[in-house]
Image (cartoon, helix red, strand yellow):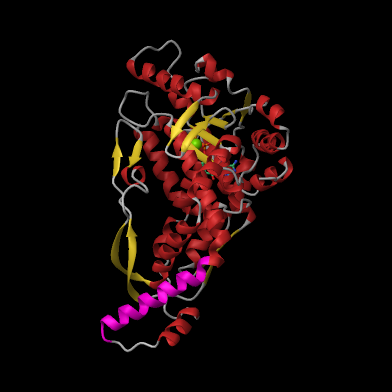
Amino acid sequence: MNLTPRQIVEELDKYIIGQAKAKRAVAIALRNRYRRSQLPKDLREEITPKNIIMKGPTGVGKTEIARRLAKLVKAPFIKIEATKYTEVGYVGRDVESMIRDLVEVAVRMVKDEKTHEIEAKVKPVVDNRLIDAICDTRRASDIPVDKTIVADELKNGKLENEQIDIVVIDTPKPMLAVGGPEINIGSIFDGMLPQKHKKRRMSVARAREIILSEECDKVIDKDNVYAEAIRRTEEEGIIFIDEIDKIIGKAGGSNNQDVSREGVQRDILPIVEGSTVATKYGNVKTDFILFIASGAFHVSNIEDMIPELQGRFPIRVDLDNLTKEDFKRILSEPKNSVTLQYSSILKVDNINLKFTEDALDEIAEMAATENETSENIGARRLHTIMESLLEDISFNASGDHPMLEVKVDRAYVQNAFKESKKKFDLKKYIL
Ligand SMILES: Nc1ncnc2c1ncn2[C@@H]1O[C@H](COP(=O)(O)OP(=O)(O)OP(=O)(O)O)[C@@H](O)[C@H]1O
Ligand SMILES: [Mg+2]
């Protein structure tokens, strides 16, 4: 979490082309969490996060930025779609559940850390339980057992796939949805009911996971975990609200749908503004949670949001429309670039794709033109073009031939679309 703004932007640059303003804004907001955490408590209380709202056309990287941030930050982070929520009193998820989800993430984070810390300590206990289970299972089917040999083989990883019977704690999983919030019945009665045990058959590898988590649960102090999780949620939590424009009714509109969307905005307001939400781990104050919202705002404007909510997103960044040059870079530069994805996937079937520079030019050019002439769908256009470009080869590759090198150059691209261009033209005539 202590990445500097520069480092954060560098990380984002590995996956997202352009959009410098948005990257900078997010990077600063993230770093400010850390800066604030270094201040004395009384000053800290005064500083609330500067929430961000990102606006930009479809397919230019808004959601992608959120996805990459999620992997980058070591803080509790969730990305939610605003459209998932409904106004309190209606069937559906109420907005407070986003806080409950965030705490859930924090709890898992803290638990994982603690598990990691004590893993070495509980390992002998886990191994012993495994060895006993293996021996018992073998004995049950009249196979002679030598415990030392079993222990040895287990240590050398030779028994991972052996099926064994183990007695595990039977955790009830019934979920009860009462007008929105989901309640896990099992967890309500946590510690009140005697634990039930159940014999189950599974591989040694799977059994190890389960036993490890059972043994760790015995050692880890749950109350500590929950307290730490709540602290992190309150102090470091980040919620990315995607598609926020979808909960904005048209200006002046007053049909039912618009009213209920405005209801969701009203419900979100206290959470963004700072309130206390009850979760099963305890109360969470939302005052210092950082919110980053994003939306395409095709039909509505940020100004159509209810004013109080607008006011809580002081930082506004516009994402840029992508150009032909951006498309070309998106094709090849990101760590998970489209061309890399296709060549890796086809390599499995012995096709070695090589894209030439001018092929990338051609594809980028096509994407830009298509976006202009038909609907502008941003970088998503690249996916549709690549899909039809490689349709033929994807269908014919079978893997039962030696490695074939296929050079995709400008001619290849033009050729591949000759047919569809004709079809495209025809359709135009018919229309
Ligand atoms: N600037 C970019 N750099 C790299 N890849 C991008 C960029 N913009 C979009 N993409 C790619 O295009 C696809 C769609 O992008 P994304 O989901 O971020 O769109 P969005 O801005 O959230 O659009 P929408 O408003 O429709 O939700 C993703 O696969 C993403 O990897
Ligand atoms: Mg999106």
Which stretch did the figure color magenta? 122-142
Can you see residue 406? no
Main SS of the magenta part reads helix
Quadrant occupied by the C terminus: top left
Residue visible at 41% across and 79% down in the picture: 159
Residue visible at 30% across and 51% down in the picture: 172
Q: How many marks?
A: 0
Rendering coords of residue 372 (x, y %): 53, 33
The reply to whether the magenta stretch includes residue 133 is yes
Position of residue 19 relative to residue 148, above or below, is above
Q: Quadrant of residue 392?
A: bottom left
Q: Residue furthest toward the top?
A: 252
The reply to whether the magenta stretch includes residue 342 is no
Can you see residue 37? yes
Q: Residue furthest toward the left?
A: 141
Position of residue 82 relative to residue 61, above or below, is above
Position of residue 136 relative to residue 385, above or below, is below
Q: Quadrant of residue 209?
A: bottom left
Rendering coords of residue 113 (x, y %): 56, 54
Residue visible at 38% across and 77% down in the picture: 132
Q: Nearer the viewer, residue 24 or 18?
A: 24
Quadrant occupied by the N terminus: top right
Rendering coords of residue 245 (x, y %): 48, 25
Position of residue 253 relative to residue 373, above or below, is above
Q: Nearer the viewer, residue 28 or 43?
A: 43
Q: Is residue 342 left or right of residue 254?
A: right
Rendering coords of residue 393 (x, y %): 44, 61
